[in-house]
Image: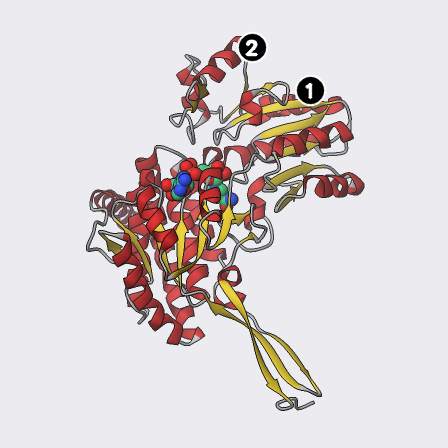
Amino acid sequence: MSVNEKMIQDIVQEVMAKLTIVAAPVCGSRGIFNDMNTAITQAKKAQNCIHKMSMDQREQIIKRIRTKTLENAEILARMGVDETGMGNVGDKILKHRLVAEKTPGTEDISTVAWSGDRGLTLVEMGPFGVIGAITPCTNPSETIICNSIGMIAGGNTVVFNPHPAAVKTSLFAVNMINEASLEAGGPDNIACTIEKPTLESSSIMMKHEEIQLIAATGGPGVVTAVLSSGKRGIGAGAGNPPALVDETADIQKAAQDIVNGCTFDNNLPCIAEKEVVAVESIVDQLIYYMTAEQGCYLLSQAELKRLSETVITEKGLNRLCVGRDARTLLGMIGVTVPGTIRCIIFEGEKEHPLISEELMMPILGIVRAKDFNDAVEKAVWLEHGNRHSAHIHSKHIDNITKFAKAIDTAILVKNAPSYAALGFGGEGFCTFTIASRTGEGLTSASTFTKRRRCVMSDSLCIR
Ligand code: NAD
């Protein structure tokens, strides 16, 4: 292809991306309905069809969802940023690629078998039916695509009640998933939603007789609501992940990893480093590398006061600050910095509200600990018993083990940025629903199935 052709193709793609944003799907598009009851009825019809399909046919649908996600990664990323005002396009493109490439499909559904003198017994993973899913505004389409792949692989269909602040992006993703299904020979409405999701539509979903399992991804309010619904709930709740650094760590690399993780998509991922606890002997060195090499801006006391008042108001967390980049946040308090600045740091006590609260913005408070045991104690306090995520930079195996046991989180990343936990620069699969509260941990297709025992007595053992 000549350079000119390539340029023209890029321009066409950019224009198409912008046009698609204007033409976001509405009611009448695939899987999008006016009311929750209709959405569930249609998803049930699709589930009857999916359940009869072979595993190979399900996998063909998932393969098509992956392809379409890759094709639409930039559109989805732009839509997410435009609609919510949070995060950044480059990182959101990476998140969509990750979800397309590393979310497990039907290979995650396996059978356990016992065979012996008294016959053959299998435990098979069967579908729940229609799963109700509630999704956040921080990773809207990423969560919808990730949940859909896992739930469909398990033989289910899904009805979403997305966050109202990310409805356009969510509807686009739902429409895309159904287009993928049709293109792969599957049914329409394998993922459904409604045009105007509300708390009321969420409540209708939670009470509906066809919904036996609800997966809630979001803050503490929604997880508590789902766990009080009387239905089985998967609760993927809030976190406040500390990054602990001890004196044995490679401090220069720790500074780089922590800032890379913290600034990814402007700190929106629930697993991202939200504060640092470092032992006294290396704190100054860590701050040096962060400011000299990693684009961190060290706040003065006066700036810290102004930033605290801006980020946490009398009404609580200022949503206008969530998912904004460091320069925008500093601009809000009248500080102008060069484009190289990507993270805001300061030293403070663990009780400081910009340290103890889950902010979801690239602000890293650094807490000084007198020794490793003190660091563990402070980090555990800061995690608030969410049992979600924590990170450690250390080369001391006993220290790592001690921290892992004390903090007891679903995720513990050692010597890497937090996103290594999602398979990005680390081994393992990807998910955007980490069931911290209910203990399933990183969810995948098998999480969305029920175990059924199938027994053949005194036969079929051919050993
Ligand atoms: P949020 O709690 O404001 O909203 C999440 C979803 O829950 C939305 O769809 C919202 O409409 C719904 N919701 C909120 N309260 C509800 C209630 N009482 N009843 C029914 N539905 C309700 O969260 P957000 O701002 O969209 O996302 C950020 C939060 O989600 C952070 O706390 C973050 O840590 C958490 N999160 C967790 C995970 C995880 O996998 N554990 C993933 C992403 C985000």
What residue occupies the far top of the structure in this picture? Answer: 302
Label 2 Cα crowd, 10 Å radius (few <14 / some 14-19 / many 20+): few
In which quadrant of the rendered view does residue 158 lie? bottom left
Q: Nearer the viewer, residue 195 or 142?
A: 195
Is 325 located above or below residue 457 in the figure?
above
**Sequence order check: which comes first, mark 1 or mark 2?**
1
Task: Please provide percent x and percent y for residue 398.
Answer: 80, 41
Q: Could you tell whether 200 is left or right of 450 in the image? A: left
In which quadrant of the rendered view does residue 319 lie? top left
Labels in figure, total: 2
Is 340 located above or below residue 78 in the figure?
above
Q: Residue at x 72, y 29 (%)?
A: 375
Element type at marker 2?
A: helix
Element type at marker 1?
A: helix
Q: Could you tell whether 461 is left or right of 308 in the image? A: right
Q: Residue at x 61, y 90 (%)?
A: 460
Q: Is residue 338 visible?
A: no
Q: Amino acid at mark 2?
A: Gln
- Quadrant where the N terminus lies? bottom left
Is 255 located above or below residue 150 in the figure?
above
Q: Amino acid at mark 1?
A: Asp
Task: Please provide percent x and percent y for residue 303.
Answer: 50, 12
Task: Kindly identify which residue carries mark 1.
Answer: 284
Q: Residue at x 49, y 70 (%)?
A: 126
What residue occupies the far right of the structure in this picture? Answer: 398
Label 1 Cα crowd, 10 Å radius (few <14 / some 14-19 / many 20+): few
Task: Kindly identify which residue carries mark 2.
Answer: 301
Of circles 1 and 2, which is in front?
2
The response on whether ligand 1 sits within 8 Å of label 2 is: no
